[in-house]
Image (spheres, rainbow, N blue to C red):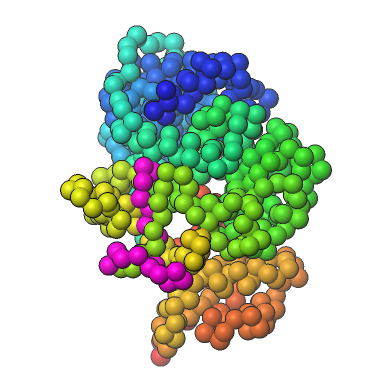
């Protein structure tokens, strides 16, 4: 049985105890060891008085203790909150306050930086440092501070709190277009179903080795663990500095499955992949935004034996669609069809289904739909609404996720991403998808990253700004000339700005919000 998240591991420990679950640098952890470590951490949390459904946050890089703590919290009947290790102290403190975190697991070095901000977290009662060092920073008296070894070795016997697959397992914080990040609440059922669904269409098996390069705070990053554990495969954890480090990781651990987001794939596509890597890298996956067709073509040329899965997902429903590798040549700009255990609809504002080719909002129904946003009924009601395709005769409402993404469906049922509804550019009376402009720009040799933004304009309503990062051969005039050749006049950027570094958010995606804020007054009329 593996109805609960941590049971993905215990089931494998019973079946193949000596099989490797984790690779971290030069250390390997078997499923048996991993299961024992999770049970020990669970007892530690219970000894601290963790109640059913209370939150445990981890603020760590990809370490063994991070994995032990997340799944240990789930085992105990608590809820784990993975915090992106790149966040700054005030951002971390916001998350701890927002979901009333009871226990924080971090390192002594990170705690020294966090300490001043933690004084504003009244619900935080215990902090565990994984390296057993005594932080010099002073904490408020209400917090218990424990070293990792002491935490594990001073426990009392006790059973985990009773919990079922519909209970909370995790809260993942996701950035929106405005305001502070929202905590998406995921149940055990959400996460187990998602893991098994993804493993089924990727054909994962026990001999697979996945590389976890993305942060665990990102559902796509955390999925590398859960997907592998669902089939008894292994995962190698790395925190990379440069894209080339990822290729080295693929080579070192003989990785068979690699997941990344478009900005990272754009960089990886420029690099060389060794013949050895080509032999064992069975598949690569993309999510977190549309992969430029030029990038897909480069990767397929470099990795001719590797299958490419183009996927679409959102934290509120984990994963929604995938395009099988054999469809890329036929429909390279498609995000595919629904994954197993999901139905994907394209609907008008009134909830009626769109005709083929007609743009509408993507709505996801099924067991992957999250439980809502933590402690935010208003935002939950905006995104989690009654399903437009509920079977007749059932009196209870079924809740679906209304994604806020604009898509269309073709005659054969394949979906095509247009844009975020809140990112659509409205210029000169036309609606322009940023991805349409960006796709044209990515066809220019030397372009590494591009973002099309709609900014306030006194005449046009919004004007299109194109921000691009490329090699030394790229000029703004060349980009403008290419766009004028390939795009209708209303889609041609009013201005092109070249940058030496493109900002990214905590999940590795281009930070459009930051760019829009930086250039918001670019087309503003000067004051007389």
Q: Position of residue 2 (x, y in %)?
A: 43, 26
Residue 116 appears in the picture as rendered: no
User: Is residue 38 within the magenta segment?
Assistant: no
Question: Could you tell me how many numbered marks the image carries?
Answer: 0
Could you tell me which quadrant the N terminus lies in? top left
Q: Is residue 343 left or right of residue 255?
A: left
Region in magenta: 350-368
Q: Position of residue 223 (x, y in %)?
A: 50, 39
Q: Is residue 190 left or right of residue 134?
A: left
Above or below residue 262? Residue 220 is above
**Residue at the far left in the pictured view:** 395
User: Is residue 351 within the magenta segment?
Assistant: yes
Name the residue at 33% across, 25% down. Answer: 77
Q: Position of residue 84 (x, y in %)?
A: 48, 42
Q: Quadrant of residue 421?
A: bottom left
Of residues 344 and 311, the one nearer the viewer is 344
């Amino acid at each position: 049985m593996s109805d609960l998240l941590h049971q993905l591991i215990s089931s494998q420990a019973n079946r193949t105890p000596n099989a490797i679950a984790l690779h971290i640098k030069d250390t390997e952890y078997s499923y048996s060891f991993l299961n024992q470590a999770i049970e020990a951490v669970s007892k530690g949390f219970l000894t601290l008085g963790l109640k059913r459904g209370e939150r445990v946050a981890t603020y760590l890089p990809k370490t063994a203790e991070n994995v032990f703590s997340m799944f240990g919290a789930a085992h105990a009947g608590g809820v784990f909150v993975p915090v992106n290790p790149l966040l700054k102290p005030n951002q971390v403190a916001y998350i701890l306050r927002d979901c009333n975190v009871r226990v924080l697991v971090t390192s002594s070095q990170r705690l020294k930086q966090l300490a001043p901000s933690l004084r504003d977290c009244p619900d935080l009662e215990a902090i565990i440092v994984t390296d057993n060092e005594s932080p010099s920073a002073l904490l408020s008296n209400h917090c218990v501070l424990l070293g990792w070894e002491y935490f594990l070795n001073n426990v009392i016997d006790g059973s985990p709190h009773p919990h079922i697959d519909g209970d909370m397992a995790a809260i993942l914080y996701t950035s929106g277009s405005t305001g502070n990040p929202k905590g998406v609440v995921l149940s055990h059922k959400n996460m187990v179903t998602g893991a098994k669904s993804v493993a089924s269409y990727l054909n994962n098996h026990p001999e697979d080795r996945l590389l976890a390069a993305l942060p665990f705070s990102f559902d796509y990053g955390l999925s590398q663990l859960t997907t592998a554990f669902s089939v008894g495969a292994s995962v190698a954890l790395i925190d990379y500095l440069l894209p080339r480090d990822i290729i080295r990781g693929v080579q070192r651990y003989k990785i068979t499955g690699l997941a990344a987001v478009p900005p990272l794939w754009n960089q990886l596509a420029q690099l060389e992949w060794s013949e050895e890597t080509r032999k064992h890298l069975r598949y690569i996956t993309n999510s977190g935004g549309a992969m430029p067709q030029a990038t897909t073509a480069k990767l397929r040329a470099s990795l001719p034996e590797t299958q490419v899965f183009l996927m679409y997902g959102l934290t509120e429903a984990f994963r929604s669609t995938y395009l099988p590798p054999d469809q890329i040549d036929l429909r390279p700009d498609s995000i595919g069809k629904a994954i197993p255990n999901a139905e994907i609809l394209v609907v008008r504002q009134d909830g009626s289904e769109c005709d083929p080719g007609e743009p509408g909002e993507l709505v996801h129904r099924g067991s992957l739909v999250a439980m809502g946003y933590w402690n935010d009924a208003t935002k939950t009601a905006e995104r989690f609404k009654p399903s437009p395709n509920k079977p007749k005769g059932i009196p209870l409402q079924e809740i679906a996720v209304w994604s806020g993404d604009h898509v269309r469906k073709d005659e054969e049922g394949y979906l095509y991403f247009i844009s975020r509804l809140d990112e659509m550019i409205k210029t000169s009376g036309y609606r322009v998808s940023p991805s349409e402009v960006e796709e044209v720009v990515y066809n220019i040799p030397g372009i590494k990253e591009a973002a099309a933004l709609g900014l306030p304009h006194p005449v046009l309503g919004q004007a299109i700004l194109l921000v691009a990062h490329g090699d030394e051969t790229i000029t703004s005039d060349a980009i403008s000339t290419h766009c004028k050749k390939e795009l209708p006049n209303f889609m041609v950027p009013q201005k092109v700005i070249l940058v030496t570094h493109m900002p990214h958010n905590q999940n590795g995606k281009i930070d459009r919000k930051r760019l829009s804020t930086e250039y918001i007054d670019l087309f503003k009329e000067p004051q007389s």
